[in-house]
Image: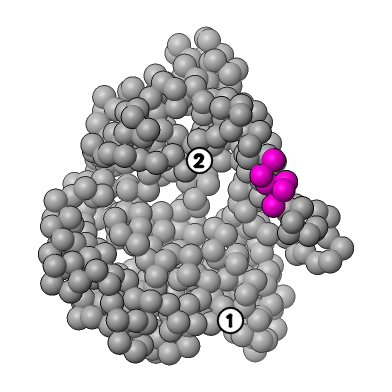
Amino acid sequence: MHELLRTPPPTPNGTPPDDGPNSPGVEGFAQRLEAVWTRTERTREQGLYYYFQPVDELDGPWVTTEGVRKLMFATYSYLGLIQHPRVIAAAQEAAGRYGAGVHGVRILGGTLDLHVQLEERIARFMGREDAIVFSSGYVTNLATISTLVGRGDWVISDRWNHASIVDGCRLAQGEFRRYRHNDMADLERILRQAPHRASKLVVADAVFSMDGDIFDLPAAVELAARHNAWLMVDEAHSLGVLGTTGRGIEEHFGLPGAVDVKMGTLSKTIPGVGGYIAGDRKLINFLRHSARGFVFSAALPPAVVAGILAAFDVIEEEGAERNHILRRNVDHFIHGLQAAGFDTGRTCTPIVPIMVGSEEKALAMTQVCQEQGVFVLPVLPPAVPEGTSRLRANVTAAHSREDIDFALEVFIGAGRAVGVIGEQAAER
């Protein structure tokens, strides 16, 4: 299905290649529109199109979509806060007090006391001097990287980084280099190539969104210090997931304050929308007055901000317990899949890739799972390299052990049905 995105040609994790007028696949937009339309319609006719399913109702980890009840395994609500009563009550109260929206961009008339409270809360939670909130996680990475990195600077990115990081690096006016995934020797090789006087920014995901593995923060911190580079880490999938209280990768490795530019989203573990940067006051002040994605974007609505604030309260009070439940569920799910013969790649987090190889098997296995009551979606090239198509299953603290067992039964049956695993392996 992701073949619809194949202009220009695919590269790992949605990373766009260096394109130009003579690049393969470059064609007029009319031809691209027609190609995508044709492929989409063909996939729909085959009954294999499961994107954009409208969710009609939520009941914990179960959802109803188009009248059918399914167990949700495509969610980012890792701690299960999306329906928490305190979050919903805070959002409702704020809408009644402040109205539905704001008066414009933050730098002019769009700042509420709630926005100030949220940024102070994020800074305190992250152990930083200050924080800034953007309208989305994508905008956060795009605006921050392109604002920090100017002509003569170097920005160095993991090859498996999220597309928002890659796009920010491409928009920046500095030298953009990529190192092999989580390969600290390759990172050091590139750092050595950078001019001594050049400002250097190393950027990586904390938890990589397609494979669920964890960034080698201790080694990166040592390299950044040795080569006088700044370190920026995207905590989109690690907030609430890593560390005993869910504070992320620094807590996980016992390295408080190790990251210079601490980025995260407010739409995954935190059930809202937006993104943030936490850091020292000079950094945040610079972004407030220079990052175009902040200066020229409308402020978050009051109901959203209030809900986010309440979610941070819940994490501070219940995070350790919910994180323990999440860890238990993740271990049970991964071990069950592996015992059945599935390849789950490098994951050790709630992002669990069920590797199937071909796009055809990924689509067929998705169809079986959806028909058997599990809401899961395939990840195909160019979001991942050719030959590594997979189903990406996300585990949460809201899943019960019975939910996990039901999902395992469905995945194992689907894997056998399409030939991803054999009968003998599935029965172990």
| Disc 2 element | loop
Is 35 included in the stretch rendered in magenta?
yes
Tell me the residue at 13%/72% (across/down). 97
Q: Is residue 107 magenta?
A: no
Q: Which mark is residue 162?
A: none
Mark sitting on residue 149: 1
- State the image coordinates of residue 282 (x, y, percent, origin top left): 39, 89
Is 58 situated above or below 164?
above
Instruction: Name which residue lies at 61% across and 48% down.
Output: 383
Q: Amino acid at mark 2?
A: Tyr
- Residue 177 place in picture, x, y as percent: 68, 69
- The magenta segment is 33-38
Three-letter amino acid code at disc 1?
A: Val
Residue 307 vertical placement versus 121 (above, below):
above
Q: Is residue 391 left or right of residue 129?
A: right
Q: Which residue is mark 2?
A: 51
- Toward the viewer: 188 or 271? 271
Q: Earlier in the sequence, mark 2 or mark 1?
A: 2
Mark 2 vs mark 1, foreground winner is 2
Res 298 seen here: yes
Q: Is residue 314 among what the camera can see? A: no
Q: Whole-percent x and y of residue 290?
A: 48, 88
Residue at (50% x, 35% y) in the render: 50
In the picture as drawn, the residue positioned furthest to the right comes out as 22
Q: Is 61 on the left-hand or right-hand side of 209?
A: left
Q: Which is nearer the eye, 115 or 320?
A: 115
- Secondary structure that dominates the magenta span: helix
